[in-house]
Amino acid sequence: MALITPAGAVTEAKRIVGGSLTSRRRDTTGAVLLVLLGLAVVSTLLVLFTLLGQVLVQALPLLGERGAEFVTDTIGSEPDAVGIWPGLYGSFVIGLGVLVVAIPMGVAAAIYLEEYAPENRLNRFILVNIRNLAGVPAVIYGVLGLIIFVGWLRPVTGGESVLAAALTMAVLVLPIVIITSMEALRAVPQGLRDAGYGVGASRWEVTRDHVLPYAAPGILTGTVLSLARALGEAAPLIMVGAITGLLPETSLQGKFTAIPMLIFNWSGRPDPPGAELGWSNTAAAAGLTLLLLVFLFNIAAILLRNRFERARTGT
């Protein structure tokens, strides 16, 4: 039976819409909310640009004098002669380890929980614990990495090595990858799945050919956030044995350090009296390098996201 809108309801709707469009009454609540939202945006941008400006002011004199030597030299005891190569190597390997270990595991877990797992108490219990793990302090993951990857898996990782640090950071961001991937999969319209099933596709074919390409931009956004957190954390690295002293060489199973550790160590040292360049300049230059490293990883993720977005929209 067709549904017919009563003529009186149509007239009343026209009257209400017309009245709201021609009314001269000011929306005070909306105006106050708009001002508050604008202030929040301006405050956030001011804090962000102030921090970036402070880092640039302190980092540029050292980078202008040292140039590429600041990246290729090793750690030392003079602020105007040190380099960050061991820290850059450690941070790059840690980021690579997160991409290789945490992202595939996290996306696979999200696909199972969102597309295959039945709705029962066990799966609800697992989901609650994954969400709780995303809020656990990073130092707790450092203790976990010290016990498992440094202690139990010493024959594989070499103990206090960059491999143990990469695995620890992968575990740290794994809950975030799972949660963001599940949200991206949940945002895929159910009609897309139904269309695939309607032409006889299996569940895996629907997931592979329809759901994953549609959810890929959201999954990559979560990947960027996870990677940025892994590259910026210092507490788990302290627990798994990162050092700040001189490293004779960089290797996968030897002593290691990372840029957050160098920033933590250098920012606590007093500047030499009378020197033009101090440890504060060195720490700022290391921080700027870490920002550039995160920026490069972000560019790669954004390019992949745009590629999937164009494939999805057909543009």
Image (cartoon, grey):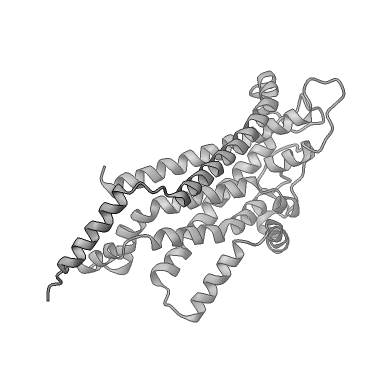
Residue pushed farthest front? Answer: 24
Front residue (pair 8, 284): 8
The residue sitting at 63% across, 43% down in the picture is 91
Q: Position of residue 85 (x, y in %)?
A: 67, 34
Whether residue 95 is visible to the viewer of this picture, yes or no, is yes
Q: Position of residue 175 (x, y in %)?
A: 56, 61
Q: Quadrant of residue 292?
A: top right
Q: Position of residue 307 (x, y in %)?
A: 35, 43
Q: Up-down: is 56 above or below 242?
A: above
Residue pushed farthest left? Answer: 1
Q: Quadrant of residue 78?
A: top right
Q: Position of residue 170 (x, y in %)?
A: 59, 55
* Quadrant, the C terminus: top left
* Quadrant, the N terminus: bottom left
Left or right: 147 as drawn, with respect to 205: right
The residue sitting at 61% across, 49% down in the picture is 230
Front residue (pair 78, 63): 63
Q: Up-down: is 25 above or below 69?
A: below
Residue pushed farthest right? Answer: 273
Whether residue 199 is visible to the viewer of this picture, yes or no, is no
Front residue (pair 180, 113): 180
Q: Up-down: is 278 above or below 249?
A: above
Residue pushed farthest bottom? Answer: 121
The residue sitting at 77% across, 44% down in the picture is 243
The residue sitting at 26% across, 67% down in the picture is 194
